[in-house]
């Protein structure tokens, strides 16, 4: 076994040399604005728990009730050992929340994307994705075997060119069924905190008869008058065929889902391999997520949404005043561009020394040389905690090697 380990160590050494090595930092507390790690307290600006629900009493109580009623495990795939009521309850709540005919839950957002893309596109089809799409979209698009085309981030002219190409391809050769074109994009981009050009994309996909799958991982629960996501905020919900979301971010639990028509959900039950060939998520997770969906849809959800935007505005205004260049849109993901991996790691270390937990994001989560600190704000943060973060960032920026990219 020695040569096996030596070979792997060599690979790790190469990652370390490029400043791309990662390791896990144990956390000894629930998620929240304050966390404990290795005996120290930190202000947490790293979590996607945007509405502060991950440690909410009502989610925990729902989880406890589910464990009493259904136990800890789900036994098998839902098509094998029967489909627990807790999952149906969650899916009914999701469909009501999203205003769709139906919804289907998966064990993660990652599994949702891979399963749904594979169910909808095959070898003879074309999948078109934004350059900055999440890894699960890239993997799903590669795995399904369709022709993959990537357009530069939010470049709708390039998207149009790709759709034109796919359209001419469609007419060629005798196909057993209509060749499909599936566009997949995030609504709020996970590492950049900017928004998809959704109106233009929807118009293009309609003009070319393509389908749109919208990954609302970072928008579900926080955008739109009913917090359904960015499609709702842009009044485009009825024009997006496949709406995807996660249960693990603003919804505070874990898992993923697709919301859409009954036909879409029925097809996924029959064709999505990550759904079919995987043990159903624990009933505990389904119950916690259902409690979260109901909470987000309620008046309290609206209040938390407002608190979140107040904190986001506070942080972004503070940063802009301090000379940082930020995406102009309003989103709780705030990237502080460092450029080199080295600089991002130095900033993260300095923040940690100042008691702030915020990760250095590096390749392959972002491009090489595009390293950054990714700050995330939640409704649970208090104004004084944002002020402490701004103060800590001021300390970092004062280091000569850590000067931000000033406009
Ligand atoms: C986090 C994320 C996912 C994956 O969701 P998980 O539930 O964490 O597996 C999918 N898409 C985007 C854009 C994400 O940020």
Image: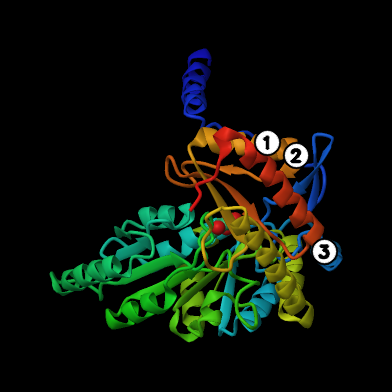
Numbered mark located on residue 167 in the image: none
Q: Which residue is drawn at 68% across and 36% down?
A: 350
Check disc 1 and report the residue beneath it.
Answer: 350
In what element is the residue under mark 2?
loop
Check disc 2 and report the residue beneath it.
Answer: 354
- Comparing labels 1 and 3, the label whose residue is closer to the camera: 1
Residue 13: give x, y in percent of width and height: 50, 22
Count residues near mark 2 (Cα–Cα under 10 Å), then give few for <14, some for 14-19, many for 20+.
some
State left or right for residue 175 relative to residue 1.
left
- Residue 128 visible in image: yes
Q: Residue at x 47, y 81 (%)?
A: 263
Count residues near mark 1 (Cα–Cα under 10 Å), then give few for <14, some for 14-19, many for 20+.
many
In what element is the residue under mark 1?
helix
Q: Foreground: 192 or 167? A: 192
Q: Distance between the residues labelled 2 and 1?
A: 6 Å
- Comparing labels 3 and 2, the label whose residue is closer to the camera: 2
Check disc 3 and report the residue beneath it.
Answer: 56
Q: Tag 3 or tag 1, which sits nearer the N-term?
A: 3
State left or right for residue 203 relative to residue 311.
left
* Ligand 1 - quadrant of the structure image: bottom right
Look at the numbered discs 3 and 2 and tell me whether their residues touch, using CB distance below 8 Å: no
Residue 26: give x, y in percent of width and height: 74, 38
Look at the numbered discs 2 and 1 and tell me whether their residues touch, using CB distance below 8 Å: yes
Look at the numbered discs 1 and 3 and tell me whether their residues touch, using CB distance below 8 Å: no
Q: Foreground: 271 or 18? A: 18
Q: In which quarter of the image is residue 383?
A: bottom right
Ligand 1 lies under 8 Å from the Cβ of mark 1: no
Question: Height in image: 361 above or below 136?
Answer: above
Q: Foreground: 8 or 378? A: 378
Ligand 1 lies under 8 Å from the Cβ of mark 3: no
State left or right for residue 280 relative to residue 264.
right
State left or right for residue 401 relative to residue 162.
right
């Amino acid at each position: 076994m020695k040569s096996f380990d030596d070979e792997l160590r060599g690979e790790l050494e190469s990652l370390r040399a490029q400043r791309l090595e990662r390791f896990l930092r144990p956390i000894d507390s629930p998620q929240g604005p304050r966390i404990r790690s290795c005996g120290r307290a930190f202000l947490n600006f790293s979590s996607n728990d945007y509405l502060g629900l991950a440690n909410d009493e009502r989610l925990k109580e729902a989880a406890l009730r589910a464990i009493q009623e259904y136990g800890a495990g789900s036994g098998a795939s839902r098509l094998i050992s029967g489909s627990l009521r807790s999952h149906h309850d969650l899916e009914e709540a999701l469909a009501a929340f999203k205003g769709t005919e139906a919804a289907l839950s998966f064990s993660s957002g990652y599994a949702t994307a891979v399963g749904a893309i594979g169910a909808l596109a095959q070898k003879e089809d074309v999948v078109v994705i934004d350059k900055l799409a999440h890894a699960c979209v890239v993997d799903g698009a590669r795995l399904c075997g369709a022709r993959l085309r990537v357009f530069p981030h939010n470049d709708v002219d390039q998207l149009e060119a790709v759709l034109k190409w796919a359209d001419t391809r469609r007419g060629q050769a005798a196909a057993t069924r209509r060749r499909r074109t599936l566009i997949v994009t995030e609504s709020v981009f996970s590492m950049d905190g900017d928004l998809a050009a959704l109106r233009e994309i929807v118009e293009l996909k309609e003009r070319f008869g393509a389908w749109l799958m919208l990954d609302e991982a970072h928008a579900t629960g926080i955008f739109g008058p009913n917090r359904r996501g960015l499609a709702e905020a842009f009044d485009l919900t009825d024009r997006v065929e496949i709406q995807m979301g996660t249960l693990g971010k603003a919804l505070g639990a874990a898992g993923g889902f697709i919301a859409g028509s009954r036909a879409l959900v029925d097809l996924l039950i029959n064709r999505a391999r990550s759904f079919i060939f995987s043990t159903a998520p624990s009933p505990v997770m389904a119950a916690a997520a259902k409690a979260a969906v109901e909470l987000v849809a309620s008046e309290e959800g609206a209040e938390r949404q407002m608190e979140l935007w107040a904190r986001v505005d506070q942080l972004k205004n503070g940063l802009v005043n301090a000379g940082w260049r930020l995406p102009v849109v309003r989103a709780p993901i705030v990237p502080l561009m460092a450029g080199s991996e080295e600089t991002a790691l130095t900033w993260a270390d300095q923040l940690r020394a100042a008691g702030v937990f915020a990760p250095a994001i590096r390749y392959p989560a972002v491009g090489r040389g595009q390293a950054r600190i990714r700050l995330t704000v939640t409704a649970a943060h208090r104004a004084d905690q944002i002020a402490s973060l701004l103060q800590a960032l001021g300390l970092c920026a004062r280091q000569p090697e850590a000067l931000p990219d000033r406009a």
